[in-house]
Amino acid sequence: MARLGALLPLALAAVVLLLAVAVDAATPAARPPKAQGPKDPQPPRNEKPKPKPMKVKCKDRKLYPYCYGKPMECPAECSQSCYADCNSCKSVCVCSVPGACGDPRFIGGDGNAFYFHGRRDADFCVVSDRDLHINAHFIGKRGADGMSRDFTWIQAIAVLFDGHRLYVGARKTAAWDDDVDRMELALDGVPVSLPQEVDATWTSSAVPMLSITRTKAANGVLVVLDGKFKIRANAVPITEEESRVHRYGVTTDDCLAHLDLAFKFDTLTGDVHGVVGQTYRSDYVNGFDVKASMPTMGGESNFATSSLFAPDCAVARYHAPAGHRGDGVAMA
């Protein structure tokens, strides 16, 4: 009987142990930890994230009370290159209005798009009228194998008016940085200096009707000669992606900085000429093949000039004031 009393505690302990094992077996297994797959690739530390779309707005409360001060985001296709159309209260891409962009794709005064490739390291008259003349300097690069022409872009323009010479250009640069200003401006050979701030404005003391305003802190300006013209100019590079897609073959020593341009003219005559100027004439006939993927304007010899500041193309209409030299020294 004494032995039975001694074994009883051991039996009870065994029962407790068996119950614990049974409960543990009935309990569902704990969930395994979540799978730790490879993390999303992170951009290199030295690679800048894409900037947010630029916002623009109308600044004249009297003329545009409905649209005044309303921020408008640039469209996705031109996130850093648009302006506010205050009449429609919409943001508009610089390259969707009359002007010239890229491997020069022009939009004429008649609203039709065409290409004029010109020639690298040469100058051509874009607009020539009685009291206004605009030349463009083309830069370029050897075309890909099998191409019959070089790639070209507009690097600078010279605007001749009332005996004055205005230069707007993009400086040559190797590595592009959106925050570094590559615009170069000069009036009658004297550099124009503008603070790197949005809306910073310079007004000429020699030509009070002429002003230049930054449309963004760097690489974008609006040139206005009241009553005559508005010219929007943005300095832009050829990106690695553009070079890959179009086989431009851009090298590390030159990103081929060039200008995207938009024009608005107020007082052109019916006799205006030039690559894009002729498209403003009432008698202009668009002879391009509407089915062509790249309608191209020829006649380079008609538009070639001897220098950037020379209004001497075959179709020139400009009459410089007496005593005024039409040529000049191009900016570097």
Image (cartoon, rainbow, N blue to C red):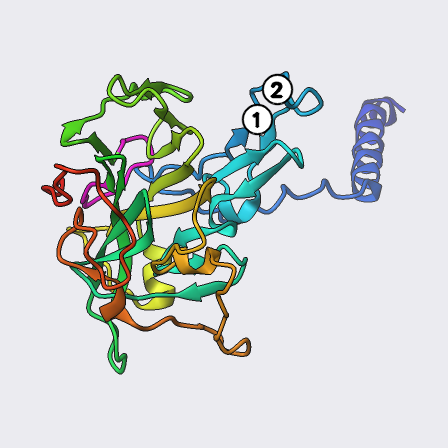
Return the x and y of residue 235 as percentages of the image width and height. 32, 41
Mark sitting on residue 233:
none
**Mark 1: which amino acid?**
Lys
Disc on the earlier residue, 2 or 1: 1
**Residue at x-position 32% and y-position 55%:** 126
Residue ID for mark 1: 57
In terms of image quadrants, where is residue 90? top right
Is residue 4 or residue 105 the one in the foreground? 105
The span picked out in magenta is 170-181
Return the x and y of residue 21 as percentages of the image width and height. 78, 39
**Mark 2: which amino acid?**
Gly
For residue 259, above or below residue 183: below
The prevailing secondary structure element of the residues shown in magenta is loop
Q: Is residue 106 visible?
A: yes
Give left or right: position of 264 versus 26: left
**Residue that extends furthest to the right in the rendered view of this protein:** 1
